[in-house]
Amino acid sequence: GGTDCPLCGEHLPRGTRVHSVLFPGKEFDLMRIYGCRHCWEGHASADLSGSLNSRQCPSCGETIPEGGYVMAQVYSKPYRKTHVHVYGCTVCKPGRG
């Protein structure tokens, strides 16, 4: 079970979290996605003994710098599974989220 980190591709066992911050909106919510314990230095359970994985933007493919993040729109409907649409990062869409 589990899933992969959307930024570094590391396989995450079930229950492992990717750090993100949600900003509620009217039509959709905005989310900043920072990464998992394998790629984001600020993660609460980051393994500081080794080097962190490189974080890549799923939209443009660029490496996300330290302090950067990916931006997404989150659509939540009561009758559907939550949909997350990544539209860029702090490299390819500066000032957009």
Image (cartoon, rainbow, N blue to C red):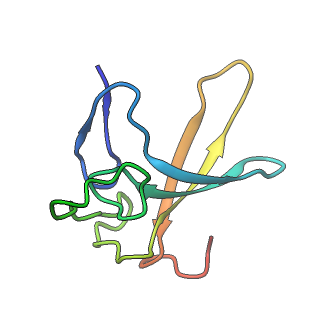
Q: Quadrant of residue 75?
A: top right
Q: Quadrant of residue 32?
A: bottom right
Q: Is residue 42 above or below residue 93?
A: above
Q: Residue at x 28, y 66 (%)?
A: 61
Instruction: Using residue 20 as the reference point, say whether residue 1 is left or right of it.
Output: left
Instruction: Locate the C terminus and report the quarter of the image it occupies.
Output: bottom right
Instruction: Tell me where residue 90 appears, x and y as whole percent.
Output: 47, 76
Q: Residue at x 73, y 47 (%)?
A: 28
Instruction: Tell me where residue 46 appears, x and y as whole percent.
Output: 33, 54
Q: Quadrant of residue 31?
A: bottom right
38 or 1, which is in the foreground? 38
Q: Residue at x 44, y 73 (%)?
A: 68
Q: Is residue 94 above or below residue 58?
A: below
15 or 58, which is in the foreground? 15
Instruction: Tell me where residue 52 appears, x and y as whole percent.
Output: 22, 62
Instruction: Tell me where residue 1 appears, x and y as whole percent.
Output: 28, 19
Q: Residue at x 53, y 48 (%)?
A: 85
Instruction: Using residue 89 as the reference point, say whether residue 80 is left or right of it.
Output: right
Q: Is residue 26 above or below residue 82?
A: below
